[in-house]
Each structure stands twice: as C-alpha cells, then as structure tokens.
C-alpha cells in the first residue's frame, strides 16, 4: 500500500501558508458559492483535508487542542474556509470504524475528501452484504469538491425500524462515492456562502456493510489507537463549530481595531474612534467575551484529553461540560 504523506510541521502552519490564497480568492469563492479551485488545491497539497487522519495513513492526527486552534485560525482568515476545514478536514475520523484495509484504501489516499450531512435522516434497509439507502439530506458542506459523501440513515429490517434499545432507533452514517448521489443546487444564502452546503439525494443506493460507519463501535482498527480517537465523536467532529465561531469573532475584532485607528465618526468631537471612551469600553467587553470563551472551551477540551491519554473515556459530566463550553463559545 502506498500512503501519501502530509507536509510537516503541522496543520496550524499549513493554514498560515495558504492564508494569502484564501484571501485573494475570497470574493471568487463567495461568488461561486464554494471554495475557489486554488484554495481547494492548496488544501490538498498541504494536507488540510487530513487533519484528523492518522499519522500512519499520512495525516496530521492533530491533537484536540491543536485541531481546535487550527480551525479557529482558518475561520479568523475567512469564515467559510474555517467551516470547510472543520467539516472536510475532520472527516478522516470516519476510518475509525472501518476495517483496517478499507481505512487504508480510503484515507491513505491524499485525494480523498469526504462531505456529508446528519439531518434529516434517510432510510437504510438491511440487505445481503449491506444496505439499500434512500433519502435527501441538507447542508452537505464542501460537497462540490468531495469524492465521497455520507448521510445519516435510520436502519430498517424490512419495514420495521431497528432499535438499539427500546425507544432509540439505530442510526448510521452511510458512506458512498459522489458518483452514486445527486447533488442539488440549494445553497443560496447571505452568510458562509463559500461553504457550498448543498442538498443531496440517494435513491436506492447500495452501501456495503464496511461503509456503514459505526459511531459507537468497539475496538478501532490499529491506525486509530491514539488517545485523540478516544474522545467522544461530538467533541472531535461537532464542537469545533465553536472554534469557527471564535475565529469569526476574532476576525471582527481585528477589523474593528484597524478601523478604529483611522475612522473619525460624525459629530462635534474631532477624534478617532479609538480615542472615545465608549468605544474602548465596548471593545474591552468584546475582547473579554472572546478570550474567556476560548479559555473555557480549551479547558474543558483538555480535561477530556487527559482522561483519553490515561486510557479512559469521558463520563457524562465531562461531556455535558464540553457541550456547555462549546455552546457558550458559539
């Protein structure tokens, strides 16, 4: 097996390296409602679609704090870029529940880009060797440049909904190449335009068992044995949304500081914005909100990682506090 390597030293440095391209293409990305080709090509070259892919498969295998800081740094440059990095850059996590050979084939390939959607749930009917999947999903960010797509689907045995426990249906992400889906042009919005978060449809698509991703699987394959992969799925793949929000907020403060040095608001006082006491108070409040939210988010993230490094799993209290810190930051 040939495993493509990722440039080093790390994803945060890769974000800094591609920043000029992202800024130069920002208007074009907004206009076409997806990241411009030079940005996507640069992300591939720098390995940014492989931030959570194991090192043994050529990825960065970013530790949790580094992952969140990388996403925030990207969103500080451009909100859509940060969002795409968060969604597509973390998709290597999907290989955790795959057989070893499948994970190697899919995530050992530097050209693999995975998009997907959680809601609404599709329908997956169990059949010989896998599932027949149908449904329409919304908000598949980055689907225009993806090679594979997953959609969360409720599993059925014939007409009967399968249950994990009474009252809890079995829901599984179903992964398939983009050739098997229909992409619908639905992303017409006023913010984060360049994420290209379109709808897509699967119509009676066969998904083999090995591509039904088990989020609560037991022992992962050997490539996913590191402590970063012991964190809850929501922590690693959901809560970086808070890092996107922090990056956008920090960008706003950056822009405001630049504006305040030169702008003289209308009125009798011929002073710049930064010389006005009310502005200084409001700026201080904004900075405190962002800095404190970031600090609490990382404190809760680090608490989970300490447990993972010791071989344990985050308990309900750790998970709840992470949810709260991420919601607060967002």
Image (cartoon, rainbow, N blue to C red):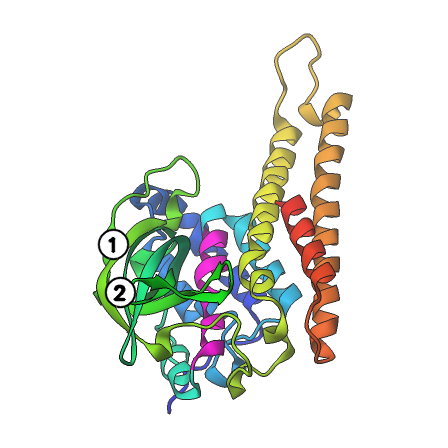
Q: Earlier in the sequence, mark 1 or mark 2?
A: 2
Magenta segment, prevailing SS (helix, strand or loop): helix
Q: Which residue occupies 75% across, 65% down?
A: 303
Q: Is residue 325 magenta?
A: no
**How far separated are the C-alphas under marks 1 and 2?**
9 Å
Is the C terminus in the top left, top right, bottom left or bottom right quadrant? top right
| Element under disc 1 | strand
Classify mark 1: residues with Cα within 10 Å, few (<14), some (14-19) or many (20+). some
The answer to whether the residues at label 1 and label 2 have Cβ atoms under 8 Å apart is yes
Is the N terminus in the top left, top right, bottom left or bottom right quadrant? bottom left
Asked if residue 74 lies left or right of residue 190, the reply is: right
Q: Nearer the viewer, residue 270 or 216?
A: 216
- Residue pointed to by mark 1: 183
Q: Which residue occupies 45% across, 48% down?
A: 80
Q: Nearer the viewer, residue 311 or 45?
A: 311
Q: Position of residue 76 (x, y in %)?
A: 56, 49
Which disc, if any, is residue 284? Answer: none
Task: Give the magenta range.
Answer: 81-98
Q: How many marks?
A: 2
Please, is residue 329 above or below residue 99 in the view?
Answer: above
- Residue pointed to by mark 2: 178
| Element under disc 2 | helix
Q: Which residue occupies 72% across, 55% down?
A: 321
Q: Nearer the viewer, residue 67 or 258?
A: 67
Q: Position of residue 52 (x, y in %)?
A: 52, 71
Q: Is residue 85 magenta?
A: yes
Please, is residue 31 above or below residue 239 in the view?
Answer: above
* Residue sitting at the far bottom: 1
Q: Position of residue 196 (x, y in %)?
A: 35, 49
């Amino acid at each position: 097996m040939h495993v493509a390597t990722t440039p080093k030293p790390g994803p945060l440095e890769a974000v800094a390296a591609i920043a000029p391209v992202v800024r130069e293409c920002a208007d074009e990305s907004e206009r076409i409602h997806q990241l411009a080709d030079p940005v996507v090509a640069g992300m591939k070259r720098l390995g940014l679609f492989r931030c959570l892919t194991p090192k043994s498969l050529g990825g960065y295998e970013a530790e949790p704090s580094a992952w969140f800081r990388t996403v925030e740094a990207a969103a500080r440059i451009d909100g859509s870029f940060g969002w795409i990095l968060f969604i597509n850059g973390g998709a290597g996590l999907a290989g955790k529940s795959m057989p070893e050979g499948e994970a190697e084939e899919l995530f050992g390939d530097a050209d693999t880009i995975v998009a997907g959607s959680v809601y609404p749930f599709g329908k997956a009917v169990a059949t010989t060797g896998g599932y027949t999947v149908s449904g329409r999903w919304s908000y598949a960010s980055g689907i225009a440049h993806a090679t594979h797509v997953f959609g969360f689907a409720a599993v059925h045995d014939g007409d009967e909904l399968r249950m994990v426990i009474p009252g809890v249906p079995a829901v599984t992400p179903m992964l398939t190449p983009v050739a098997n889906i229909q992409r619908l042009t639905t992303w017409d919005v006023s913010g984060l335009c360049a994420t290209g978060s379109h709808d897509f449809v699967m119509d009676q698509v066969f998904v083999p068992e090995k591509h039904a991703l088990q989020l609560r699987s037991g022992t992962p394959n050997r490539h996913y044995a590191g402590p970063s992969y012991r964190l809850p799925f929501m922590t690693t793949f959901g809560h970086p949304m808070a890092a996107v929000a922090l990056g956008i907020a920090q960008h706003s403060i950056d822009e405001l500081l630049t504006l305040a040095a030169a702008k003289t608001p209308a009125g009798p006082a011929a002073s710049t914005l930064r010389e006005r006491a009310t502005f200084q108070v409001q700026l201080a409040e904004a900075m405190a909100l962002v800095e404190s939210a970031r600090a609490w988010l990382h404190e809760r993230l680090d608490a989970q990682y300490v447990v993972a490094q010791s071989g344990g799993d985050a308990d309900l209290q750790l998970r709840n506090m992470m949810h709260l810190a991420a919601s607060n930051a967002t």
